[in-house]
Image: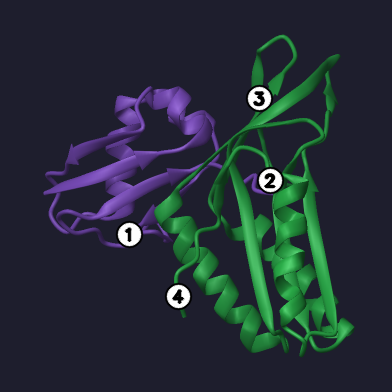
Chain colours: A purple, B green
Amino acid sequence: MLVTVKYFGMVVENTLTNSEVVAIEALDPTIKDLEKILQNKYPSLANITYNIALNQQIQEKSTKINDRDELAFLPPFAGG
Amino acid sequence: MKKKNVFIKGAITPDFIANSITKHQTKTTIGAHDIFLGQVRADEIKGKTVAAIDYTAYEEMANLKFDEIRETTFVKFELTCMHIYHSLGTVKAGEICLFVFVSSPRRKEAMKALEYLVETIKAESPIFGKEIFEDETHQWKVNS
């Protein structure tokens, strides 16, 4: 399946892109499966703090993901 | 409820704030306004001074979150109206980056609602701030 992944703030300094489409081969993948793929691709992600949003809602890493979902890596918030 | 746009490019000007207050003078059921203004601080960190913050946001999620925060606040407090504006892009030290404006028939509701709103916005809205130092290096701001 294919999902869109967006990156924000300091995460972008590790991925060097704001957004990409990622292919996942696992059956019934979870957010954790996607995170593993991206930590392999961008090892420095392991050094920073972030939450992952699935379709604009922060979710636990055990949450299942579906084809065409939108995920986002969100570093600590700094509004205001 | 109509969708409102929270984000403003660059700093929020004193004129914008003054106009917003003026617009409420026709709403005569209001007895109390309370306003929060967030201003960019020239923090000194390891001998370097913050000159500006460059704000970015996950705008789709932030707008959903702001709708949710507004709905919850209207349920919890007796408010006549509520406005939230946040900057995107560069805001220099000393300029305003967040403007939260609540109005109510009574002061206590306005004051309680404002504190709740500001704290919730800071904790839950996906907005990111790059603190730019005078020597053009940077670090990422984290809300405390």
For residue B139, the mark is 3
Residue to which mark 2 is pinned: B12
**Snapshot quadrant of residue B36:** bottom right
Going by the image, does B24 lie left or right of B48?
A: left
Residue type at mark 4 is Lys
Q: How many marks?
A: 4
Q: Report whether mark 2 lies on the same chain as mark 1.
A: no
Foreground pick, B57 / A5 = B57
Going by the image, does B117 lie left or right of B125?
A: right
Residue to which mark 1 is pinned: A55
- Foreground label between 2 and 3: 2
Q: Do the CB atoms of the residues marked 3 and 4 lie less than 8 Å apart? A: no
Q: Chain of mark 3?
A: B
Q: Do the CB atoms of the residues marked 2 and 4 lie less than 8 Å apart? A: no
Q: Residue at x 24, y 45 (%)?
A: A4
On the image, the x and y values in percent for residue B93 come to 78, 30
Q: Secondary structure at mark 3?
A: strand
Q: Secondary structure at mark 4?
A: loop
Residue to which mark 4 is pinned: B2
